[in-house]
């Protein structure tokens, strides 16, 4: 966040400097208000560009094996342009490299879900997915598994058949 703020300020300063240089070349023919207005416009464009580019930049730096399962676009009242063109503010990725399966429970998979958010810390939680039953259980500390690999104290939640996390984690590679 700090580097984006510095980048936005530098973009505004560069725009002001360019307009100042043009005005100097034109021997002061431009109105005085052009310098701060151009700086403000460029700073606004830089901030909007940073917001819209966050999702693609973040996806590009994800480690191999991470697959984006779901992305959330949210319009905002203090960013009125997002009603016309919403941008991704957060998304969930499935770490396919960490998928684990018990031989006695072939329809169930333990996966790491990674939650990314704009201006938020990345968090990771393990979940148990029942691919055949279409349900999910969060694995908290102290989760217990039986001899056959079945979780004994799970709080299952039913999922829709087209749930993006379920379909991404249960897809065969």
Image (cartoon, rainbow, N blue to C red):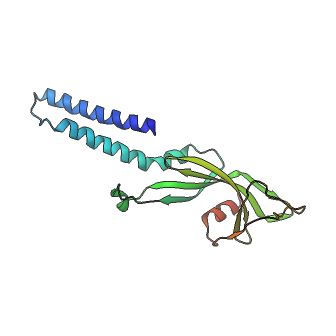
Image position of 2 with respect to 104: above or below: above
Residue at image position (36%, 38%) is: 8
Q: How many marks?
A: 0
Q: Locate residue 141, reporting x and y percent.
A: 75, 53
Q: Locate residue 101, reporting x and y percent.
A: 80, 58
Residue 149 found in image quarter: bottom right
Position of 60 compared to 14: left or right? right
Residue at image position (30%, 36%) is: 12
Q: Locate residue 55, reporting x and y percent.
A: 49, 50
Depth order, front residue of 17/147: 147
Image position of 91 with respect to 61: above or below: below
Image position of 26 with respect to 136: above or below: above
Residue at image position (58%, 47%) is: 122
Residue furthest front as drawn: 142
Residue 128 found in image quarter: bottom right
Depth order, front residue of 25/17: 17
Residue at image position (79%, 58%) is: 143
- Position of the C terminus, as image quadrant, is bottom right
Image position of 123 with respect to 25: above or below: below
Position of 101 compared to 21: left or right? right
Q: Locate residue 63, reporting x and y percent.
A: 63, 44
Depth order, front residue of 98/43: 43
């Amino acid at each position: 966040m700090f580097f984006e703020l510095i980048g936005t300020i530098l973009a505004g300063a560069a725009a002001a400097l360019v307009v100042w240089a043009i005005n100097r070349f034109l021997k002061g023919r431009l109105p005085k208000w052009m310098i701060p207005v151009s700086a403000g416009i460029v700073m606004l464009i830089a901030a909007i560009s940073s917001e819209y580019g966050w999702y693609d930049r973040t996806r590009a730096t994800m480690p191999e094996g991470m697959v984006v399962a779901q992305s959330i676009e949210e319009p905002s009242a203090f960013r009125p342009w997002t009603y016309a063109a919403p941008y991704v503010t957060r998304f969930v990725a499935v770490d396919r490299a960490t998928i684990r399966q018990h031989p006695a429970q072939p329809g169930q998979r333990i996966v790491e879900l990674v939650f990314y958010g704009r201006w938020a810390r990345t968090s990771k939680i393990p979940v148990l997915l029942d691919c055949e039953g279409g349900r999910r259980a969060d694995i908290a500390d102290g989760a217990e598994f039986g001899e056959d690999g079945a979780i004994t104290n799970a709080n299952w939640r039913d999922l829709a058949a087209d749930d993006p996390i379920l379909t991404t984690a249960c897809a065969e590679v």
